[in-house]
Amino acid sequence: FGGNGDDVLRGDFNSRSSDNTLGGDDVIYGGAGSDRIGGKAGNDSLFGQNGDDQIWGDAGDDLLRGGLGNDTLFGDNGSSGDGSDTFILAAGEGTDRIGDFQVGEDFIGLADGLTFGQLSVTQEGNNAVISFGDETLAILNQVQAETLIDNAATTFVLVG
């Protein structure tokens, strides 16, 4: 758990779990402040909470939620990005910029009663923009809005 202020938190790539696999399934909460959070290996659950956070899932099937603030989320580190990641969106939590979304591999999790029918998905330059009313929930870098819409049934999932 991070505290008040800006924290750097990461899961441990070098540890081994009880079944002798590299890394672990970490749960990390950033707390208040603009935090930098990295999951490293394993299937991690990473929560930025308050502040403008930067979150990297790295390897594994990760769950990322920025929380309040304008956050930047990366499911995988871009060089060894294995795994399908879930990027959680909710109304009233600011705009998340998602740096490495892969349609057909990753998921957009809709939280707090949000449904796909309430959203608009538009194109701005090379990026898909997901909005709820006047609020921009997420900007997906290098993703086509039309592709997201065409794959909505398998891309958008309801989460707690």
Image (tube, grey):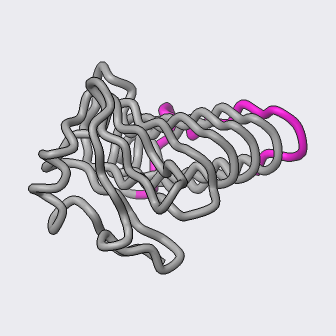
Q: Is residue 99 above or below residue 148?
A: above
Q: Which residue appears at 48% of the width and 80% of the height?
A: 113
Specify start and end residues of the magenta stretch as a single range. 1-18
Q: Position of residue 96 (x, y in %)?
A: 52, 43
Membership of 89 in magenta stretch: no
Q: Position of residue 132 (x, y in %)?
A: 46, 61
Membership of 11 in magenta stretch: yes
Q: Which residue appears at 68% of the width and 45% of the height?
A: 69
Relative side of 146 to 92, left or right: left
Q: Is residue 62 above or below residue 10?
A: below
Q: Main secondary structure of the magenta part?
A: loop
Asked whether 137 or 83 is in front, the reply is 137
Q: Residue furthest right?
A: 4
Q: Position of residue 51 (x, y in %)?
A: 75, 42
Asked whether 128 or 64 is in front, the reply is 128
When asked about the image quadrant of residue 83, the answer is: top left
Q: How many marks?
A: 0
Q: Which residue appears at 44% of the width and 74% of the height?
A: 114
Q: Residue furthest front?
A: 134
Q: Which residue appears at 32% of the width and 31% of the height?
A: 124
Q: Position of residue 8 (x, y in %)?
A: 72, 30
Q: Is residue 94 above or below residue 39?
A: below
When asked about the image quadrant of residue 80, the answer is: top left
